[in-house]
Image (cartoon, rainbow, N blue to C red):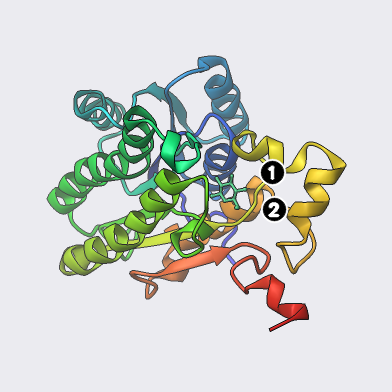
Amino acid sequence: MDSQPLRGQKALVTGANSGIGAGIARALGAAGAAVVVNYVSKPEDAARVVDDISANGVDALAIRADVSREAEVETMFAGMEQAWGGIDILVNNAGLQRDAVFPEMSLEQWNTVLGVNLTGMFLCARAAARRMIRRGVRPEISRAAGKIICVSSVHEVIPWAGHVNYAASKGGVGMFMKSLAQELAPHRIRVNSVAPGAIMTPINREAWSTPEALAALLRLIPYGRIGLPEDIGKVAAFLASDDADYVHGQTIYVDGGMTLYPEFAHGG
Ligand code: BGC
């Protein structure tokens, strides 16, 4: 098997300075892709991911942009195009939580989550699709004109009390991805999602940082371990590669079985 199936390809990963995004950026770099490491804060973390990727001999570049802001997204894609001539792979990863019990949820909490998790995907996918359509398929690079991968969540299908804004955004990602896949297929742009379960990252630190919390979390994961960013990175790299050339419009759950209704293992 080709150990660098993404050699010669240019990728952009949003929110790539930490957590799952950093894991995906590293995995794409290891597969041979040049990677733009997008970030919105903590440039020193983005620089570390860039260093790790370049250490493997492929190009990496950190670009700051808030994905919920159209002008910043446009400037980021223009900068990438100027540096590398185009984009082959977009990973729409940037996401956040602003949790609140529903009666207390502010409009700002709602808008921030929808703005980054859903509008951010729209703005980045649109900027990428325009460029991928313009360049078309270059068979020496890939069988597709481009690949767009959305990072969804098990909460695309698992309702989540106390996190209505977040679950609504991920439910939206499901239809966003599928409708986009249907529309972009004639352009030979492949669109898919990877939907992580509980992955050990800063976003859910509360759920794994004490033994009690971890024990409660593990009751929701039949496979019996919390996930790691590289678990998601490997699947994203596969989806971006021509090995997945016939995979289109799919959400791949990478969750240790969290979506298997684990409570029903002992009841019902
Ligand atoms: C959330 C995490 C949560 C996980 C499983 C993710 O989408 O961001 O906070 O631990 O889903 O519930």
Left or right position of 53 against 10: right
Q: Amino acid at mark 1?
A: Met
Point out the image quarter for the N terminus.
bottom right
Query: Residue 262 lies in what quarter of the image?
Result: bottom right
In the displayed orientation, state which residue is furthest to the bottom: 268
Q: Amino acid at mark 2?
A: Gly
Point out the image quarter for the C terminus.
bottom right
Foreground residue among 154 and 71: 154
Give how far across and how far down residue 86 sits, in percent. 26, 39
Task: Judge the density around disc 1: few (<14), some (14-19), many (≥20) Cα neighbours within 10 Å.
Answer: some
Q: Residue at x 65, y 48 (%)?
A: 199
Residue 130 visible from this viewpoint: yes
Task: Judge the density around disc 2: few (<14), some (14-19), many (≥20) Cα neighbours within 10 Å.
Answer: some
Mark 1 lies on residue: 200
Query: Residue 265 lies in what quarter of the image?
Result: bottom right
Give how far across and how far down residue 127 sits, in percent. 20, 40
Give how far across and how far down residue 87 sits, in percent. 30, 43
Q: Earlier in the sequence, mark 1 or mark 2?
A: 1
Left or right position of 54 against 105: right
| Vertical comparison of 206 with 137: above or below | above
Give how far across and how far down residue 2 sits, in percent. 56, 62
Mark 2 lies on residue: 227
Foreground residue among 59 and 71: 71
Name the secondary structure under disc 2. Answer: loop
